[in-house]
Amino acid sequence: MSPSRFLGSQSRERDWENASTASSPASVPEYTGPKLYKEPSAKSNKHIIHNALSHCCLAGRVNEPHKNKILEEMEKSKAHHFLILFRDSSCQFRALYTPAGETEELTRLTGYGPRTISQAMIEGIYKYNSDRKRFTQIPAKTMSMNVDAITIQGHLWQTKKPGTPKKPGTPK
């Protein structure tokens, strides 16, 4: 190391010790612009569910009105966590649920399915993979904040009762 380089580094160190460098915190004005980082108040999966509905569950122009209605309901809701209910393992969208306060039940926000779902009713648990734009089943038995979708046991779905077709012109 040459003497001039050595002296230069010593003087910089001395300046640092005396807090007289231009980049010291005292000489930099306080940032008063908009806050760039917002501390999350609670873990939310709203954006994940939004992407899942847009790119996987209700993708395409055909599903646009249905998707927009569901996204509108999500925006109105004060909930931070949302769960999609699938009909079965084929991941066909049925409803959107939110956790019901302190209980372990889920309450239907919009769609078709039971009004509330308890832990015992759940059959499968799914996580949305935003890279692959698809859901993958999680080999877990308990709910957590990482869960994005669920399926319920098949016997819980209401089946339409077969009605007898009425012949036209028959009296009532």
Image (cartoon, rainbow, N blue to C red):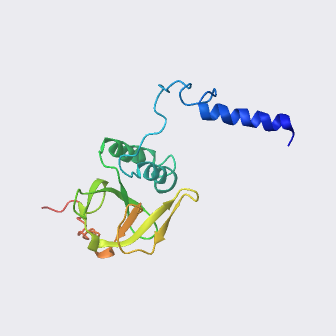
Q: Residue at x 44, y 66 (%)?
A: 126
> x, y (%) of residue 162?
26, 71
Q: Which sits in the foreground, 110 or 101? A: 101
Q: Which sits in the foreground, 101 or 50? A: 101
Q: Quarter of the image for the C terminus: give it.
A: bottom left
145 relative position to 130: left or right: left
Q: Quadrant of residue 165?
A: bottom left
Q: Residue at x 35, y 54 (%)?
A: 81
Q: Is residue 81 above or below residue 32?
A: below
> x, y (%) of residue 156?
27, 72
Q: Which sits in the foreground, 27 or 127? A: 27
168 relative position to 61: left or right: left
> x, y (%) of residue 116?
23, 62
> x, y (%) of residue 70?
37, 47
Q: Which sits in the foreground, 82 or 53? A: 82
Q: Quarter of the image for the N terminus: give it.
A: top right
Q: Residue at x 36, y 54 (%)?
A: 82
